[in-house]
Image (cartoon, rainbow, N blue to C red):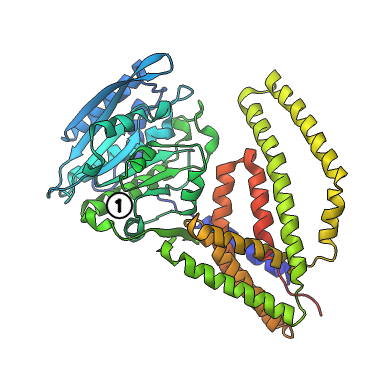
């Protein structure tokens, strides 16, 4: 049974991986009404070969090429210039603004990407590819019938230096005059274009994405993660100003990010195609709706299930989902305790053991993360060796302290007599606490606690009730583990991509929390 159970989990993971959204590259010879990644790539070959730092010749040549390309489409384009203080010099900022007039008066849709790059590399992905996507999107839109709403394409400058272009634009334009913003970014070189952040009430916009994009890829848990990270994009400026919108990026192949390797050879045409198809679909959709109708629709939680299926539901349902999951958990534990199948006290011990291990992983993982980053960026230099020495001393002190308080003996005592069922109860107890915390505190991540808790509780409670029927138990646990893995696999995959080797301790913490929920509970009797 255990082999079949493990094989089922691996099969679900493999099937989910194979169904991750992608797009077939449309050649440059295709009809003009289609978005073509090859046509977009042709732009990159002109302006994304060298770094584009504001104020440099390469930067100015790129800006002029982009503006002239838009001008040749017959679309009005202009530069909005300003100067900012950056470090010890004045930094010239040149935003490129193009406008496709709509057929009706009203607030425009703002589509944005930044055309500057870091000094270290040409930024072919970050964010030249998104600029090329918007150029190709403009070309397609210009050939078709005008949209109801005006579309403004803003190609910002100075994003890498401090979001200066976006800030300069908002200094000139009132937030109330912008109907909706779509921002395109990149933190890698491949993978699908991912919706990872929203602004304002997102419910209706998410539903429009689900209904109109061919291969939508979106996860609301990223919003909660992004809040605690020090990262910002141009979207931050618009979000802080109260402009509603969606923020997209692709992030696989993050090793090229902000390096000399972010070049033309590391641009994925399927990724450019998926980005363009998503951007074009949302431009057409939002271009033909009453943007005021997007307000008052509340926020949605959303995630992809088995590849292309984008699941959305109102975040207002979170308290109900919490109540259901806690009720199922209480039912399963009570039933197991009443029938002497479960020992809740051991479940509490597992929860305590997990918390202690998480704390240790957090401490030593932070040591590892800092050391790995030092080694990656500075190599075997004296700062790295000094850091290793400091960590060795601190680690020795921590180990000495743990031995003094007999921590290992205490952890062994917690695990004494522990069964898989006890670990499952302990993991569900922690998941119940997380469900309560995320109900309102992290609403976009709540589904990652309430759904696994509910499924595991059904599996545990059902196994207790069906204890005289091993085949029924096996069937029940396989039925419940399928949706559990479908929900969790994309989360683990994206977290692995996001944290990388430097943040491997975060993955270990997540595995410690979630793996007991998926363990087979059937026992020989």
Residue 176 sits in which quadrant? top left
Q: Is residue 237 above or below residue 62?
A: below
Q: Is residue 305 above or below residue 282?
A: below
Residue at 45%, 40% in the rendered image: 268
**Circle 1 is placed at which residue position?**
281
Q: Residues within 10 Å of mark 1 (few under 14, many from 20)?
A: some
Residue at 48%, 30% in the rendered image: 262
Left-right relation of 419 to 484: right
Left-right relation of 226 to 147: right
Residue 470 sits in which quadrant? bottom right
Q: Quadrant of the N terminus?
A: bottom right
Left-right relation of 297 to 144: right
Position in image of residue 482 (x %, y %):
58, 68
Position in image of residue 434 (x %, y %):
59, 59
Position in image of residue 70 (x %, y %):
22, 33
Residue at 36%, 59% in the rendered image: 210
Residue 485 sits in which quadrant? bottom right
Please, which residue is most extreme toward the top here? 88
Left-right relation of 317 to 357: left
Circle count: 1
């Amino acid at each position: 049974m255990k082999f079949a159970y493990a094989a089922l989990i691996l099969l679900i993971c493999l099937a989910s991986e194979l169904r991750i959204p992608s797009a077939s590259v449309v050649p440059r010879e295709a009809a003009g009404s289609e978005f073509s990644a090859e046509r977009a790539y042709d732009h990159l070959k002109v302006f994304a070969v060298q770094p584009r730092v504001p104020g440099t010749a390469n930067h100015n040549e790129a800006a002029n090429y982009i503006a002239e390309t838009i001008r040749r489409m017959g679309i009005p384009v202009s530069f909005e210039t300003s100067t900012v203080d950056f470090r010890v010099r004045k930094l010239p900022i040149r935003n490129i603004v193009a406008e496709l007039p709509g057929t009706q008066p009203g607030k425009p849709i703002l589509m944005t990407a930044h055309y500057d790059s870091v000094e270290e590399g040409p930024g072919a992905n970050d964010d030249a590819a998104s600029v090329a996507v918007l150029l190709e999107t403009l070309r397609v839109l210009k050939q078709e019938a005008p949209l109801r709403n005006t579309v403004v394409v803003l190609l910002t400058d100075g994003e890498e230096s401090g979001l200066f272009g976006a800030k300069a634009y908002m200094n000139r334009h009132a937030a109330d005059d912008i109907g909706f913003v779509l921002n395109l970014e990149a933190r890698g070189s491949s993978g699908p274009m991912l919706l990872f952040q929203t602004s304002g009430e997102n419910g209706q916009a998410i539903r429009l994405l689900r209904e109109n994009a061919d291969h939508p890829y979106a996860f609301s848990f990223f919003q909660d993660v992004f809040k605690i990270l020090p990262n910002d994009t141009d979207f931050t400026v618009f979000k802080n100003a109260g402009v509603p919108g969606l923020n997209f990026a692709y992030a696989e192949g993050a090793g090229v990010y902000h390096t000399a390797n972010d070049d033309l050879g590391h641009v994925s045409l399927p990724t450019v195609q998926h980005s363009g198809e998503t951007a074009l679909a949302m431009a057409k959709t939002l271009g033909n709706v009453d943007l005021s109708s997007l307000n008052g629709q509340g926020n949605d939680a959303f995630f992809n299930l088995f590849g292309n299926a984008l699941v959305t539901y109102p975040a207002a349902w979170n308290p109900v989902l919490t109540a259901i999951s806690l009720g199922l958990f209480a039912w399963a534990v009570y039933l197991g305790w009443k029938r002497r199948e479960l020992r809740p006290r051991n479940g509490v011990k597992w929860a305590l053991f997990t918390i202690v291990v998480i704390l240790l992983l957090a401490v030593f993982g932070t040591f590892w993360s800092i050391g790995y980053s030092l080694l990656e960026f500075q190599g075997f230099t004296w700062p790295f060796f000094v850091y290793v020495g400091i960590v060795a001393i601190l680690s020795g002190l921590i180990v000495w302290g743990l031995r003094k308080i007999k921590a290992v003996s205490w952890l062994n005592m917690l695990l004494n007599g522990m069964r898989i069922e006890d670990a499952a109860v302990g993991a569900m107890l922690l998941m119940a606490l997380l469900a309560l915390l995320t109900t309102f505190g992290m609403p976009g991540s709540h589904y990652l606690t309430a759904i696994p808790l509910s499924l595991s509780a059904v599996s545990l409670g059902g196994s207790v009730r069906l204890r005289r029927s091993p085949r029924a138990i096996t069937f029940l646990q396989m039925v419940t583990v399928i949706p559990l893995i479908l929900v969790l696999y994309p989360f683990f995959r994206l977290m692995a991509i996001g944290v990388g080797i430097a943040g491997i301790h975060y993955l270990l913490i997540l595995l410690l929390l979630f793996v007991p929920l998926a363990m087979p509970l059937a026992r020989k009797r």
